Amino acid sequence: MGDEREARWRNWMVAVQAGETPAYEKLLAELIPYLRRFIQRRLINAATAEDVVQNVLFSIHRARGSYRAERRFTPWLHAIARNAIIDQARQQLRRSQREVSLEADGVAEPSAAPVEPARERLSPELEGALGALPDAQREAVELIHLHGYSVAEAAERAGATQAALKVRAHRGYRAMRAHIEALRLEEGGE
């Protein structure tokens, strides 16, 4: 089965390099569940694993011209996936070194409502992505990231539980990222 899959993926990638869209669709249809399993075995957090899968797919798209048909496809794919996992780990490490827990320092959250940032700071790309979201997701993203409310405050304002608001916001971020990536691909900004 593995050799058949290897040959199929290799043939599809060669067809992709020749510009065949149906081959690309078939390849991605098989790669996505494979990559999810491959990456989820290496990462604990499911949301982080899904982000890495998306990064791998984007990297495959950008690097598709570098694949050499005389070589096996799976090692090329695994190298891209491993690099994406390493990049994610480095990013998390850098973020953890910059972030300071307010609880650990004994600093209380500010009691005054946060100052609302100016809406004109958003790029047209972000404005478009935000505008394309369903109302509930847009509200969650705006309350947390544009207005600066804590999840608890945002949930109260939205009339939702904290868990529901977090889900809405996460889905909103993913949808915005997909919207922006699609725009960039349309513009040829591979």
Image (cartoon, rainbow, N blue to C red):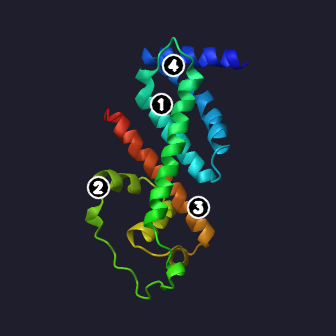
User: Label 1's element?
Assistant: helix
Q: Residues within 10 Å of mark 3 (few under 14, many from 20)?
A: some
Callout 3: SS? helix
User: In the rendered structure, which amino acid carries the disc numbered 4?
Assistant: Met
Nearer the N terminus, badge 1 or badge 4?
A: 4
Asked whether residue 173 is in view, the answer is no
For disc 2, the neighbor class at 10 Å (few under 14, some 14 to 19, many from 20) is few
Front residue of this view, candidates 102 and 178:
102
Q: Residue at x 43, y 14 (%)?
A: 18
- Say the numbered circle drawn on residue 13: 4
* Cα gap from disc 4 to disc 2, whole angstroms: 35 Å
How far apart in space, not on screen, are marks 3 and 1 (Cα)? 28 Å
Circle 4 — which element? helix
Q: Which mark is residue 123?
A: 2
Are the two marked residues, 3 and 4, in contact with CB atoms closer than 8 angstroms?
A: no
Q: Which residue in the rendered view is the most extreme toward the top?
A: 70
Judged from this view, the residue extending furthest toward the bottom is: 111
